[in-house]
Image (spheres, helix red, strand yellow):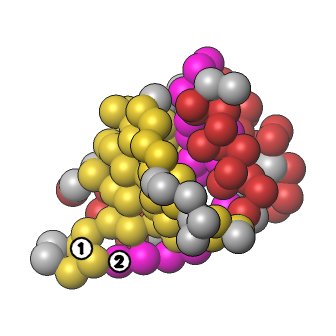
Amino acid sequence: MAAIDEVCEFLKNAGTYYLATTDGDQPRVRPFGTAHIFEGRLYIQSGKGKPVAAQIEANPKFEICAFKGSWIRVSGTLVEDPRIEAQESLLEAYPMLKKMYAAGDGNTVVYYIQDGEATFSSFTEPPRTVRF
């Protein structure tokens, strides 16, 4: 399995992961639940009106942490993809979001992870790091 597929699968199986950004010099963490591969890149989604979007714009470096028996930490840079096709693909994968978002609505924003690095950890095995 390719590293990107393994990371996406872990995040989907965890259901909820926590995205950390910065707000000036203050860390901010909040729950997220989208993880989708489109055109060979791992995407997440949010709303442009949310503080997280302004935080990502100011500093696109991030970290994600998720736990499901073992845990993963993912870091890299989030890059906004303004294409309608990318928004449609993610919303098709998460139809429940269509109650709040629509491709091209001016609020939906999707980001792909650039220079991604993920470390898989557990209490029983040494950590393993992959890059994607």
x, y percentage for residue 104?
62, 38
x%, y% of residue 105? 62, 46
Tell me the residue at 35%/77% (across/down): 28
Image point (61%, 18%), residue name: 39
Mark 1 surroundings: few (<14), some (14-19) or many (≥20) residues within 10 A: some
Residue found at the far right of this picture: 95
* Residue 114 in the image, given as x and y percentages of width and height: 38, 33
Q: Nearer the viewer, residue 99 or 31?
A: 31
Secondary-structure class at tag 2: strand
User: Where residue 47 sits in the image (x, y, percent)?
Assistant: 54, 59
Residue 42 highlighted magenta (yes or no): yes
Residue 1 drawn above or below residue 107: above
Dominant SS in magenta: strand
Q: Nearer the viewer, residue 129 or 6?
A: 129
Numbered badge on residue 23: 1
100 on left or right of 130: right
Residues tagged 2 and 1 counted as in contact (Cβ below 8 A)? yes
Left or right for 45, reference 128: right
Residue 28: image tag: 2
Q: CA distance from mark 2 to mark 1?
A: 7 Å
**Element type at marker 1?**
strand
Tag 2: amino acid: Arg
